[in-house]
Amino acid sequence: MPKKKPANQRTVFICHGTGCVSGKAFEIREALEKEVAGLGLEGVGVDFTGCHGFCQQGPIAVVEPEGIFYTHVTVEDVPEIAQSHLRDGKPVARLFYHDPVSGEAIPLYKDIPFYNRQKRIILRNCGRINPERIGDYIATGGYESLRKVLGEMTPEQVIDEVKRSGLRGRGGAGFSTGQKWEFCAKAPGDQKYMICNSDEGDPGAFMDRSTMEGDPHTIIEGMTIGAYAIGASEGYIYIRAEYPLAVKRVRLALKQVEEKGFLGENILGSGFNFRIHVKEGAGAFVCGEETALMASIEGKRGMPRPRPPFPAQSGLWGKPSNINNVKSLATVPVVIAKGADWYAQIGTEKSKGTAVFALTGKIANSGLVEVPMGYPLQEIIYGIGGGIPGGKRFKAVQTGGPSGGCLPASLLNQPVDYETLAQAGSIMGSGGMVVMDEDTCMVDVARYFLSFTQDESCGKCVPCRLGTKQMLDILNDITHGRGKLEDIDLLLKLSEQIKAGSLCGLGQTAPNPVLTTIRYFRDEYEEHIKKHHCRAAVCEGLVSAPCSHTCPAGIDVPRYVRFIGEGKPAEAVAVIREKIPFPSVCGLVCFHPCESKCRRAQLEEAIAIRMLKGYAAKHDTGLWKENLKKAPPATGKRVAVIGAGPAGLTAGYYLARLGHSVTVFEALPEPGGMMRVGIPDYRLPKDILKSEIKEIEDAGVEIRVNTRVDSVDGLFKEGYNAVFLATGAHQGMKIGVKGESGSGVMDCAEFLREVSLGKKVEVGDKVAVIGGGNAAIDAARTSLRLGAKEVSIVYRRTQAEMPANPEEVEEAIAEGASIDYLVAPSRIVNRNGRVDLETIRMELGEMDSSGRRRPEPIEGSEFTTGYDTIIAAIGQRPEVPERFNISVGRGNVIEVDPDTLATSREGVYAGGDAASGPASVIEAIAAGRQAAISIDKYLGGEGEIDETLAPPEGDLAPLEEAEEQWRPKMPTVPPEQRLGNFAQVELGYDDKAAIEEAKRCLRCDLEERE
Amino acid sequence: MDTIKLTIDSQEVEAQAGMTVLEAAQSAGIYIPTLCADQDLKPYGGCRLCIVEIENMRGLPIACTTPATDGMVVKTNTPTVNEVRRANVELILADHPSECLICDRRERCGPLDICLRNVAVTERCVTCPKNGHCELQTVVDYLGITEIPFRRTLRSYAVDDSNPFFFRDLNKCILCAKCVRVCDEVVGAGAIAIINRGYASKVATFADKPILDSSNCVSCGECVAHCPVGALMPKEDKLPTEEVATTCTYCGVGCGMYLGVRDGQVIGVRGSRENTVNNGFLCVKGRFGFDFINHPDRLEHPLIKKNGKFVEAGWDEALELVASRLGKYRPEELAVVSSAKCTNEENYVAQKFARAVLGTGNVDHCARLCHAPTVAGLVQSFGSGAMTNSINEFRDSRCILAIGTNTTEAHPIISQEIKRAVDNGGKLIVANPREIDMVRWAYLWLQHKPGSDVALLMGMMKVIVDEGLADQAFIDERCENFDDFKKSLKDFGLDFVEKTTGVPKDKIVEAARIYAAEKPSAIFYAMGITQHSHGTDNVIATANLAMLTGNVGKPGSGVNPLRGQNNVQGACDMGALPNVYPGYQAVADADVKKKFEAAWGGQMPGKPGLTITEIVDAAGSKKIKAIYIIGENPMLSEPNITHAKEALEELEFLVVQDIFLSETAELADVILPGVSFAEKDGTFTNTERRVQRVRKAIEPVGDSRPDWQITCQLGKKMGNGGFDFGNPSQIMDEVALLTPSYGGISYKRLEKCGLQWPCPTPEHPGTPILHTQQFTRGKGRFIPLEYKPSKELPDKDYPLVLTTGRSLYHFHTGTMTRKVKGLNVLKGEGTVEINPQDASKLGIANDEMVKVSSRRGKVTARAKVTEVSPVGVVFMTFHFAESPANLLTNPALDPVAKIPEYKVCAVRVEKA
């Protein structure tokens, strides 16, 4: 017996799970031991534990008893921890856990939301005890269950207890553990085997590994109890050889257990004998399948065999055998210790107890999460996982490993249990949970997972070996733009046949990712097939440069950026002009979806594509005109365009270039549509817009302002051959509260329009803007410029959900606007020329179908604030005159064929906000282009509107190694100089900044591909 | 077995309990499509085509693994089932060159038709040699598939044509894994496996090398025979127009086979499934070793040596010459060497010719050189010198002691039965100085020194007696002379045995315990036991061991000498031995003499004649002046060939009857061209005493004649009748008349699967197991033994032990197999196997030419440095005239059986 030391007053536990070990946890512990000794600290112990399951924050150190939780500890941090915390009692705050959402520092283990929402049964000891000391396990009550079972219970009683607990196989299939044991116990045979399946093969899943590394004894105890129940005298723990630490700790634990007499001959004097062997697997995914696993233990190729006979009758070496997953076995001692009734009250009716998930992917907190069965998915993702990082939108979550299904946002409020997941087309599997955001292509995801299962198929049965290959080929074709619409049906048919015909679980579940992505994201498949478009811009076969791919108008971004980098802005404009007639406008106001997918963002920050466009446009020399094709002879066809906004003018421009006679009818006194009356001057000066419209008129487009058109028939009567409806969405939407129609309440669209057209608008000192979109921000900033002293934006959700462009929001705040999040108007009372806005506080509830959490009012939290003006900026909708005689859909938008923009009437097309609902300038331009193509074809043309306007690129210098470099800051007018005028805020890049910025481009379009 | 009733496709079906649904359906004649199920193999469940619907069962269970149960209701042909089946087959077709499957001109694709591609098709579809015999086609037709809805994914693996007998074209492989499974489950070679995963899965050898480079492949062709498609095809891909059932001409196993005949030539061989000996399986020689039949070197005309040169002659002239020359000598100056290759009928007439016409008792054959000690020893112990049990019993043996037998090389099909026993949980004990292939399956390997078998076996018996593991009841009731024998055990203490054999004591003890406790226990042995100067003692030791534990007369037990030649058993049975008439009736027995004199007419020799080794010696000393050799090649098979050649050259007249100009035939004065087994009728008796039919498949080559005819013609010319046989069936009738153990045998009764003697009466069913009630001699006799070292042990000059044996790819002196091109590709020359330690001491590298010399001669051959050979021991095969091992071997004889000591002599090895 070693001499007993007085108990330490304080112990630092360094995590020694695989993740932290690879982060140098061994070295940290060594350094800390040295440091503690060097400082002569009395009563301070240094110890280690297994994995905490929060490897993302590793290496982790926990100081007990106070429970300080240090993250990302390095060897360099050790002296500070020792001196400041251990010696001086001042914990090192910079190493505390910082909440990814709030940024708040949380010093204590127990306060971290990632942990305190979990219920840990399987992982109860992980990160809590030293896994290499059996005494630690015994001190937590370990091996008491075994003692109880051997001393007080018959095998039948053990089986009954486990059956009553409702424990189901945590390997994924969810079969009752007690029943499984019963089958094996009842099978005739003198030799039986108890096998622990630790062949954790799902990419990203590491709960079994963590359990083996962090608490090996619970598995041994569970196995021994199981062996007693079924009458096995020998057992195997099948661990993949890629888990060397787990193998080491399990082997060590086995040695300790045998020394203690909990394993071997005559265990605890009961007469029961049981021995456990460790078998290392070679890392075949299929060996997680029980019959394949047994073949592998027997030294054969890991291939499943058909059942019957079931392993319970004829398993390992033909003897009755029972296989349980690590997590099932780790649960058993708890079930025995606390009783079946205790366990059965956790979870749902049919799925009892807890489940462990390996939460990973696009999630703030990735790691192991153990929650009761039936816990809502969104609670796991948002409550524990901290949501999606980087302000991105949730798209899907995949449960159950590579053969699980991808569930969309609309299912986030579902509980996680065997039945619900099965209903949704997914599986519990071994507990993988991969979160995906908007940058994930669902077709690509299906392809990826299928390529995994195809690679791991053992090759034995035809459906799995060849069926998944066929599906993979189809998916590869789709992601390369070679797919056909029938392929979707073929995938569905194959999936059903593979599920029905495959020998083992691998094949039977392999189609799940495909089935669920088709079920929930069929539109993405169709987009890939019909439009060769990947909205996440990831499919290599379709996407050359993600920026161009994402641009609704398809501008060849990398090419013009390169011209800018070479100091050739005029050439750059020519490239831009190949796709749009509004380079300057877009350079100033485009919401630049291109930047959201810029690969450079993975390094540090996206290229400032919009600003570069603006720079180029400013330095246009008209070079593009030199390459313009000569206008073709007039076709004699007449096209009427209704609405001189970006869609109408774009369509008019291209149609005129094709030789058609185009007349644009505009109801307002000036052309430009929302560019003119929706976007304030300080963002888009009138003269810039005017000069771009002038180019359009120069191309032959006639614009008739102050001309409202109410009837399409009239136009045809007048001799027009085709009509393009581009009337926009100018009608403001109602808030839907009492009192909003009274004075002092303005509609945002109307407000901005009037201001733009130079009408005098009074807003008073105190303004509330209701809404969270770009229009709301424009209204706020305009109000400030009109003299308002105090402008509040009232938004019912949080910043994360706010649709407005963050740059704009930032500017608004800089100019003095404030934003009240999670507040919604409930009533407006007009009082003596002022308006009282009664609002109610909101909290985020369940997900809605858009994947945003639905705001719900907090009862009794109403409060009232007085304002001079309330501007309702909650959305706009198109106005479609009845006499257009055209079908409109939800939101009053004109119904069109999404591919051609044809309306329900022959010869009539519609696009822009009128057909899409409120959208962006660039989307309207894209619609204008499509309308021009369709109308030209309708009029007998080829629909060929693209021209090469820029000169060819010269030899390209090789790209220099990309170093971390942020975009240059856009020079702006200082906020204090902005009020009281509508002068342009952005001043634009100078040559140096622009060239420097352009050179950051990674030139994805030049990347060599397969 | 219980009978159960189930309903399949609305049809009431009776089946045996334990059958799968597939077997039940098949037994009722209901077709369920499958591509991976095979009656020879364990269920696999890979093709997923035999799915069915079963009432009260979830999903679509597969028929090949689902047990049939009483009252089950099965539907094999529903739309749901066929839809999944169709998808599976379509998937296979998408990945398979499938023109032959869905070509709309398929039915017209026959001889001399023109196919789609405007290529003249004389045999078959040009894209696949399996067209018309392809199981995939059958399934496609069943499902009525005419087009493939999937993307075609053709592979482009290079065709592996490395093996001389078959192609491996993995592009046509459907991964049913039958090849892998048969290689593993049946053959036990494990030469191929499925490698990679997913779509990249394929059948490959270790490290994916060509099959020829796989050290495990034994070229048996079972993979080819089981391939359902065209992935594995014999290089000879013509199809026979006729098949003739017969018995293999190679080893003593006696496999049933069909010779495929086309245009008067044998072009292929197929194993006979109905035959219980081999259940359809064959080894490389049986399946592919038939080229010799139509080899250009076949002797087509009688040859007479004139002025030292052979000149073609007519039959009359040749037979006249032979008759007149042989007629000149006195009986004691004459000898007949008969052949274990020839049929029973031919051996019968040969010994009858010797005894009744030439009046000499000097008749023998090569059994002398292999199993004479078996006959001598087992007759003393049991009263009968034949294998006690039958091949297909051993799968149920609990223990098999294989001593002195390299079964996988010499008796491949029996080795499969041993493997079955091991698979069924039986324990195999291999006793062999060399690390032979079977050691892989052995529970225990006793690596004893060459020549120490008596010590090893007596040591085991001492342990059994000392530990009280002997079957005393059996000994008391069935045996005699136990006490004498028991006394002789005292010399075999474990220390002595360990020192003598080199086997650690504890292994000897373990072997003894297993052999005694795990019943039934069977002993197998072959030349490793017999070819010693104390070979008879060795045999007796095995008999003692079996009796000691009561392992005689019971299924799966016994003493089982494995006979080497196809008809060595029969040649002995037929009395081609100097001391016995047919059926082991002693020459020295006056009553027997009388019986044969009465039957054959005339005076029969009254005492045993000379053995083959004695005949050769007597030729050397000019006591024997003329010999009639039928199908034997002593010039390669005799020990100390130099001496044998000198002796034969002393002869005044030598007649050799053979199918090739063998080394011995070169010395002949007259050569008579006999025929191969494919050209004649007759019977062979295999190692388990099973008399089986040999049937004529083709006409004799050239002017050659069946050997029985030639001998009979000589007999007619020289004798006074008794050789007037119209066909071999009539000869067998005479055999039955004179040979009690063959008394009930006639061709009519042999049609199905032969009969095992003793079969004394026409009603007798034959005898699968000998000595069941009592031993042939009454009581089993324990015979005390003492250890006798081999006659020539290593010394300073000749420091290594040479032991000899057989290669899988060749047979006997290579007269046939050396004529088969492919077999020579697989093994083209003799090698000297030597342990790396010895090799490095001698500075010998692998593949280097070495000179091996003994006191009798020198041989040059290529060294194969391998740990299969133990330190101090080198090994050579005896098939190769270029490196004749028997130039070296020691002619020291066993005093009883007169067998030379082939297995042990002292040699020196040096760089050539």
Image (spheres, coloured by chain):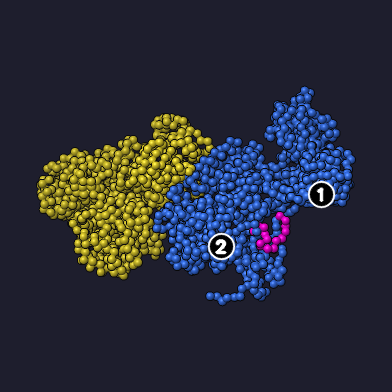
Q: Is residue B547 among what the camera can see? A: yes
Horizontal side, residue B583 vs residue A823: left or right = left
Write down the residue under mark 2: A215
Q: Mark 1 falls on what kind of element?
A: strand
Place residue B265 in its image quadrant.
top left
Horizontal side, residue A44 vs residue B906: left or right = right
Tell me what residue is drawn at x 45 percent, y 50 percent. Answer: A310
Residue A112: in magenta span: yes
Pointer 2 chain: A
Tell me what residue is drawn at x 49 percent, y 56 percent. Answer: A160
Tell me what residue is drawn at x 65 percent, y 67 percent. Answer: A63
**Three-letter amino acid code at the position of disc 1:** Thr
Residue A864 marker: 1
Look at the image and give the residue range highlighted in magenta.
Answer: A101-115
Horizontal side, residue A739 vs residue B81: left or right = right
Place residue B258 in its image quadrant.
top left
Residue B813: in magenta span: no
Q: Are marks 2 and 1 on the same chain?
A: yes
Horizontal side, residue A421 vs residue B496: left or right = right
**Three-letter amino acid code at the position of disc 2:** Asp
Mark in front: 2 vs 1 = 1
From the rendered image, report the letter of the chain displayed in yellow. Answer: B
From the rendered image, report the letter of the chain displayed in blue. Answer: A
Q: Position of residue A308 (x, y in %)?
A: 44, 48
- Rate crowding at label 2 as few (under 14), some (14 to 19) or many (20 or more) other CA atoms within 10 Å: many
Of A624 and B469, the residue lying toward us = B469
Q: Position of residue A136 (x, y in %)?
A: 56, 67
Q: Position of residue B23 (x, y in %)?
A: 38, 42
